[in-house]
Image (spheres, rainbow, N blue to C red):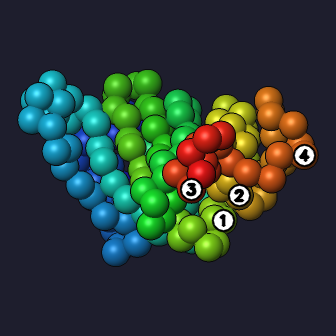
Amino acid sequence: MSEETMIEKPSYDDIISLVSSKFGDKVKFKESTKKNVRAINEKRRIYMSADREIIQDLAYYLRDKLNFEQASAVTGVDWVDHLQVVYHISNYFNAIMIEITVDIPNDDPHVPSVAPVWGGANWHERETYELFGIIFDGHPKLERLLTPSSYEFFPFRKSYKLRGQE
């Protein structure tokens, strides 16, 4: 299989093999920890983690070579000791979804934007910025959607205290 050729309907094993050979140890594959999910979604869901430096290159590769045409979701998680961005990327021809997690340090909450790759990620990234304070470098319009621009806090961060909790 030539790297220049798009594979419209890559198999589960093709995806893992091609991504592994292209990105090496910058991408790690995981298994679901839920037994019922593993049985139901076997060969339809791929779990991986990626270094934040390569997320945009990985996104272009998934779109252009493996036909993953939509970022179904982009959201954040606050694990207290670090932040995480979670991407759900879909290929409708083979019904496979890839979940990619990217860990980000609290003191440097930057990750490259995938909005240039999948336009639908635009508002997902804006919402994640607004709620978690994760900065998507290269985003075309990274600003708050619903909360006032004067807010200097991010309400979904675990360090954010509700009134009366101080």
Up/down of 51 relative to 63, above or below:
below
Q: Residue furthest right?
A: 150
Image disc number at residue 135? 2
Judged from the image, the secondary structure of the residue bearing numbered disc 1 is strand
Q: Mark 4 highlights which residue?
A: 150
Inter-mark Cα distance, 2 to 4: 17 Å
Disc 3 + disc 1, Cβ < 8 Å: no
Q: Mark 3 highlights which residue?
A: 159
Q: Relative to the observer, which residue lies in front, 140 or 157?
A: 157
Q: Mark 1 highlights which residue?
A: 110
Inter-mark Cα distance, 2 to 3: 17 Å
Q: Is residue 84 visible?
A: no
Judged from the image, the secondary structure of the residue bearing numbered disc 4 is loop
Labels 2 and 4: the sequence-earlier one = 2
Q: Nearer the observer, disc 4 or disc 1?
A: 4
| Amino acid type, label 2 | Ile
Q: Relative to the observer, which residue lies in front, 22 or 80?
A: 80
Quarter of the image where the N terminus is located: bottom left
